[in-house]
Image: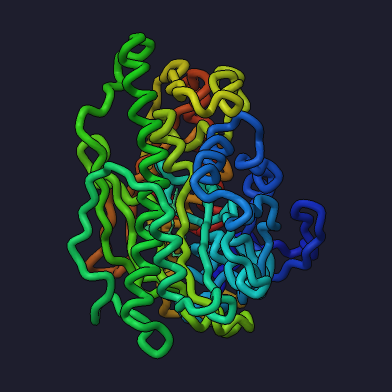
C-alpha cells in the first residue's frame, strides 16, 4: 500500500500510547486528538452507557465458559489485525486511509478480532473481548474514529470429549441447554451452501449445522436481552411522558439472518434487527476458519465467533442521538446514567437530550491537488499518475481542527474539468456543538481554520 504521509512527522521518533513507547516511521498517521482518546476506555467507565451495554452482553455469556478480557492494549501488529485473520495483503482496509498506523508493522486495532488468534492459542472454551477500536472513516452522527466492540467466541475441542460422545453430541447438548425466546426470526437460507460454504475439509455437515444453530441461538438470545430492554425503556418513558419525541416500539421484535463474508469465518452471517421501520445491522459472525485454530496450534478445535459495535447498541438502548455524546464530559450527559449499572435488572432510563443547539453549515469548494510532477522535488514523484485523494484524509483534518463541533460532512459536488482534467469538489460541513451555541463569528473562524488545514495537509486549492 502506498503511504501518502498524512501527518509527515519529520522530527517525530517515538510516541507513547497508554504506558508504552512506540517507534514511529513515515506510516505514522495518528493525530493528537486520536491519541488523547486512547486512555478513555469508555467500556470500563462506571455508569457509562458503553460500559452498561458491555455488561448486558456479558450477562448473556456467563463465566467460566466465557472468560472476559476488557483490557487488551489497542496497539497490535499488522499480523494480529490482518494476517492472522486471512485478510489479504492488498485489502483496502489495510491502507493508511482506513487504518491508524504507528509504523509499518504496528497499528491501532481496527476490530477486536485482532485478539482472536492469541486466545485460541491459549485454548479457551469461550471468551468475550471488549475494547476500543480505531478506524479512519466518514463523519456523521453514527460514525466516530474511535468506537467500541465486543467480540465473542465459543470453542469445542475434539480431543476433550466425554467417553462415547461425538463432537456433534456435545454441541447439541449445549444447544439444548440454551433458553428459548419468542422473537420472530427470519432465516431463509440453509446453514451452508456454495455461496456460504462449510469448510468441508474439516467439518462434517452435521457438525456445521449444530455449531451454526448454537451460534444463532446464542446471538438471538443476546439481541433479545438487549431489545427487550430497549422496548421496556421506551414504554416506560412513554408512560411517564418524560419524553414526547421517543415513541415506544409497538411491533414485536423481528430479526433476520443475512449471509455475509469475513475472511476468518465460513459460513458467515450478519444479524439484523427491524427497528423503527428499518433493518439495522448489529453484528457479524460465523464459524471460525480452521486455519486460525491450526495456526494457533489447536487444530482439533471447532467454534464460532461474533463481533458487535457497542455504541450502535447503546444508541438504541438509551436513544442517544449522536455518537459524539459518548465522549462528552458534560454532567448533563454523564449524570443521566448514574446508578443505572447497579439497577440493571430494572428498566433502563432513556437519555433525555439536554437541548439541541443550532447548527450551521458551511461549504468548502476546491480543486484537488494537481498530479505530482517530476519538478515537485518532494519525494512523492512515485505517486505520479495515481489519484492522490482519499475522503478519509479530509475527514481526519476536519475532525482534528473542529473537534466535536463537527456533526457531519457530506460531499455535495464532484466534477472533473473536461479540458484540464482537474478535479473540483465541494463538501458541506455541518458545525454544531452538543454543549452550547456556536456564534456565527466563531463558526466562520473555525471554518477558515479547517480550510487552512486542508490546504496544508492535502494541498487543495480553495475556489472562492
Ligand atoms: C468486524 O469488525 C468483524 N471483526 C466482526 C466479526 C467478528 C465477524 C468475529 C465474524 C467473527 P464489521 O466491520 O462489520 O465487522 O463491524 C462489526 C460491528 O461493529 C458492526 O456490525 C457494527 O455493529 C459495528 N460497527 C462497524 N463499524 C462501525 C462504526 N463506524 N461505528 C459504529 N459501529 C460500527
Ligand atoms: Mg459490517
Say if 361 sits above or below 381 in the image.
Answer: above
The reply to whether residue 12 is visible in this rendering is: yes
The x and y percentages for residue 266 are: 38, 75
The x and y percentages for residue 10 are: 73, 64
Q: Quadrant of ligand 1?
A: bottom left
The x and y percentages for residue 303 are: 48, 70
Residue at image location 58% in from the left, 28% down from the top? 341
- The quadrant in which the C terminus is found is top left
Residue 41 sits in which quadrant?
A: top right
Q: Is residue 21 left or right of residue 341?
A: right
Between 4 and 419, the residue placed more toward the observer is 4
Residue at image location 27% in from the left, 51% down from the top? 413
Q: Is residue 121 left or right of residue 446?
A: right
The reply to whether residue 464 is visible in this rendering is: no
Residue at image location 71% in from the left, 70% down from the top? 25
Say if 425 sits above or below 239 in the image.
Answer: below
Say if 9 sits above or below 322 in the image.
Answer: below
Amino acid at each position: 500500500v502506498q503511504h501518502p504521509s498524512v501527518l509527515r512527522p519529520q522530527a517525530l521518533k517515538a510516541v507513547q500510547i497508554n504506558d508504552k513507547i512506540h517507534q514511529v516511521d513515515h506510516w505514522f498517521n495518528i493525530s493528537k486528538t486520536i491519541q488523547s482518546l486512547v486512555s478513555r476506555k469508555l467500556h470500563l467507565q462506571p455508569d457509562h452507557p458503553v460500559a452498561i451495554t458491555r455488561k448486558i452482553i456479558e450477562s448473556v455469556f456467563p463465566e467460566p465458559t466465557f472468560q472476559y478480557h476488557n483490557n487488551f492494549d489497542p496497539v497490535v501488529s499488522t499480523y494480529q489485525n490482518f494476517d492472522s485473520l486471512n485478510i489479504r495483503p492488498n485489502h483496502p482496509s489495510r491502507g493508511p486511509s482506513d487504518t491508524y498506523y504507528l509504523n509499518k508493522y504496528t497499528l491501532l486495532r481496527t476490530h477486536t478480532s485482532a485478539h482472536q488468534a492469541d486466545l485460541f492459542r491459549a485454548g479457551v472454551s469461550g471468551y468475550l473481548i471488549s475494547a476500543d477500536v480505531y478506524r479512519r472513516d466518514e463523519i456523521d452522527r453514527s460514525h466516530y474514529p474511535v468506537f467500541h466492540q465486543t467480540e465473542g467466541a465459543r470453542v469445542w475441542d475434539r480431543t476433550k470429549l466425554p467417553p462415547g460422545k461425538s463432537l456433534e453430541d456435545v454441541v447439541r447438548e449445549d444447544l439444548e441447554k440454551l433458553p428459548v425466546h419468542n422473537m420472530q426470526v427470519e432465516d431463509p437460507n440453509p446453514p451452508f451452501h456454495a455461496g456460504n460454504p462449510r469448510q468441508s475439509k474439516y467439518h462434517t455437515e452435521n457438525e456445521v449445522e449444530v455449531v451454526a444453530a448454537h451460534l444463532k441461538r446464542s446471538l438471538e438470545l443476546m439481541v433479545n436481552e438487549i431489545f427487550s430492554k430497549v422496548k421496556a425503556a421506551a414504554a416506560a418513558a412513554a408512560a411517564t411522558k418524560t419524553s414526547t419525541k421517543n415513541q415506544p416500539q409497538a411491533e414485536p421484535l423481528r430479526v433476520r439472518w443475512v449471509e455475509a463474508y469475513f475472511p476468518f469465518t465460513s459460513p458467515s452471517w450478519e444479524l439484523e434487527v427491524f427497528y423503527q421501520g428499518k433493518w439495522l445491522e448489529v453484528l457479524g459472525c460465523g464459524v471460525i476458519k480452521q486455519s486460525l485454530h491450526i495456526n494457533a496450534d489447536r487444530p482439533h478445535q471447532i467454534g464460532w465467533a461474533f463481533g458487535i459495535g457497542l455504541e450502535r447498541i447503546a444508541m438504541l438502548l438509551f436513544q442517544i442521538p449522536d455518537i459524539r455524546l459518548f465522549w462528552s464530559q458534560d454532567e448533563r450527559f454523564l449524570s443521566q446514567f448514574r446508578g443505572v449499572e447497579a439497577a440493571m435488572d430494572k428498566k433502563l432510563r432513556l437519555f433525555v437530550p439536554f437541548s439541541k443547539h443550532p447548527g450551521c453549515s458551511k461549504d468548502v469548494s476546491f480543486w484537488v491537488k494537481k498530479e505530482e510532477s517530476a519538478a515537485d522535488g518532494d519525494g512523492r514523484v512515485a505517486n505520479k499518475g495515481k489519484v492522490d485523494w482519499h475522503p478519509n484524509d479530509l475527514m481526519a483534518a476536519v475532525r482534528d481542527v473542529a473537534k466535536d463541533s463537527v456533526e457531519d460532512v457530506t460531499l455535495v459536488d464532484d466534477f472533473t474539468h473536461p479540458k484540464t482534467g482537474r478535479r473540483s469538489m465541494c463538501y458541506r460541513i455541518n458545525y454544531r456543538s452538543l454543549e452550547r451555541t456556536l456564534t456565527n463569528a466563531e463558526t466562520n473562524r473555525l471554518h477558515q481554520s479547517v480550510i487552512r488545514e486542508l490546504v496544508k495537509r492535502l494541498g487543495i486549492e480553495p475556489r472562492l
